[in-house]
Amino acid sequence: MLWLKALHIVFVVAWFTGLFALPRLFIYHCGVTDAEGHDRFVVMERRMFGMMTLGATMTLVFGISMVTLAPGFLSMPWLHAKLTLVALLLVHHVYCYRLLAAFRERRNTHSERWLRIFNELPFLVLLGAVFLVIFKPTF
């Protein structure tokens, strides 16, 4: 079980690396006007999304594995709250893909300010998830 937990944490870190870095690339991409710069950001964003998706997939694989081995966790309210936060992250992840496609096709409509706010959202989820896992509140 500890191996699963360790691998889960490693891939959570990889996922969050992408969740923090990809929107930052979008912010920088907003200021690019030349074709060469645009193409360079498209490649970087695609690669970052791939790494982020691998991190998300493996996070889910190891998380599901832990719950499979210890199904009693599913009766704990804190885990339900954490899984709700994970669902929000998955929505954020999918929305990142939509933004990636919009930037690739040169049809982004979001301002740099909006993207900066969007970039901070995963931190709030991370904060909540860490507190839930550490303190395991009973509600």
Image: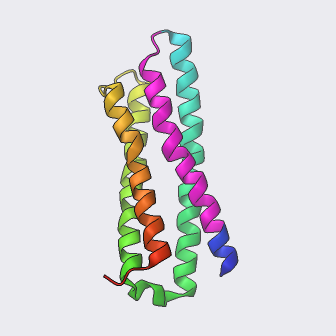
**Most distant residue in the bottom direction:** 72
* Image-based side of 90 in relation to 111, left or right: right
Above or below, 12 relative to 111: below
Q: Residue at position x 40%, y 70% from top?
A: 83
Q: Nearer the viewer, residue 121 or 74?
A: 121
Quarter of the image that includes the C terminus: bottom left
**Most distant residue in the right direction:** 3
Above or below, 63 relative to 28: below
* Image-based side of 107 in relation to 11, left or right: left
Q: Main secondary structure of the magenta part?
A: helix
Q: Nearer the viewer, residue 58 or 1?
A: 1
Q: Nearer the viewer, residue 109 or 106?
A: 109
The answer to whether any part of residue 27 appears in the image is: yes
Above or below, 111 relative to 93: above
* Image-based side of 49 in relation to 23, left or right: right
- Find residue 49 and report its horizontal and vertical position in percent: 53, 42
- Find residue 107 and report its horizontal and vertical position in percent: 34, 23
Q: Which residues are magenta?
A: 7-33
Is 30 one of the magenta-colored residues? yes
- Find residue 92 and report its horizontal and vertical position in percent: 38, 49
Quarter of the image that includes the N terminus: bottom right
Quarter location, residue 138: bottom left
Is 117 one of the magenta-colored residues? no
The answer to whether any part of residue 86 appears in the image is: no
